[in-house]
Amino acid sequence: MKLEINSSEEMQNLGATIAKTAQPNDLLLLTGDLGAGKTTMTQGIGRALGVRRPVKSPTFTIVREYREAKIPLFHMDFYRLENDDLSSIDLNAYLHEDGLVVMEWPQVIMTELPDEYLQLNIKRVDDSWNSTKREVEIQAKGKRNEDWENDILTKFKA
Ligand SMILES: Nc1ncnc2c1ncn2[C@@H]1O[C@H](COP(=O)(O)OP(=O)(O)O)[C@@H](O)[C@H]1O
Ligand SMILES: [Mg+2]
């Protein structure tokens, strides 16, 4: 399923809808080029979960934890991951926490992930550098994630 998004605010609202429909132990994968809006969406998720600190890109730390959130939020970014750097975080421990795990650039660690997740691929649809239009393609793997996707689509448009 595809959604059209017209501004950063709308992307954060989509993040808020994702947050409100998330359950502990959910896994959200965010793909798309640099500047597509993955971190912007995650900021919307954090805010809707009651995180008061700014949600910043975890590019240099791999993971940032927001345990104060209504559902604990674990925000990861694997963009700069080198071959064996994954040993610096206990990925399985995070995947077993009762929290929402959000991953930017999960492509490099796909083999380490469970087969069930919700994936959002964000694309720019205009060539102009400052366009705020994005297309978000949603892919759900597994029953829970199909339900989650439907829930998001229903509530986002409402
Ligand atoms: N519709 C939109 N959705 C998300 N970000 C947008 C949108 N339109 C413009 N932007 C801008 O594009 C940039 C996206 O950056 P960021 O979220 O860090 O991308 P990523 O994490 O995918 O590299 C931000 O400066 C944001 O304000
Ligand atoms: Mg980012």
Image (cartoon, rainbow, N blue to C red):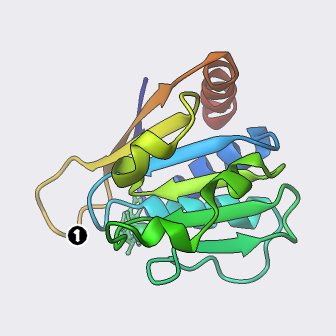
Can the viewer see residue 6 in this picture? Answer: no
Q: Position of residue 68 (x, y in %)?
A: 87, 71
At a point 58% along the width and 45% down the height, the residue shown is: 28
Residue picked out by circle 1: 130
Q: Quadrant of the N terminus?
A: top left
Q: What amino acid type should be assigned to the residue bearing mark 1?
A: Asn
Between 78 and 5, the residue placed more toward the observer is 78
Is residue 147 shown left or right of residue 122? right
At a point 63% along the width and 21% down the height, the residue shown is: 150
Q: Quadrant of the C terminus?
A: top right
- Give the crowd class for mark 1: few <14, some 14-19, many >=20 residues within 10 Å: few
SS at badge 1: loop
Which image quadrant for residue 43?
A: bottom right
Can the viewer see residue 51 in this picture? Answer: yes
Q: Position of residue 74 (x, y in %)?
A: 68, 63
At a point 22% along the width and 69% down the height, the residue shown is: 130
Label 1 within 8 A of ligand 1 by Cβ: yes
Instruction: Determine whether 153 is above or below 61 in the image.
Output: above
Between 25 and 4, the residue placed more toward the observer is 25
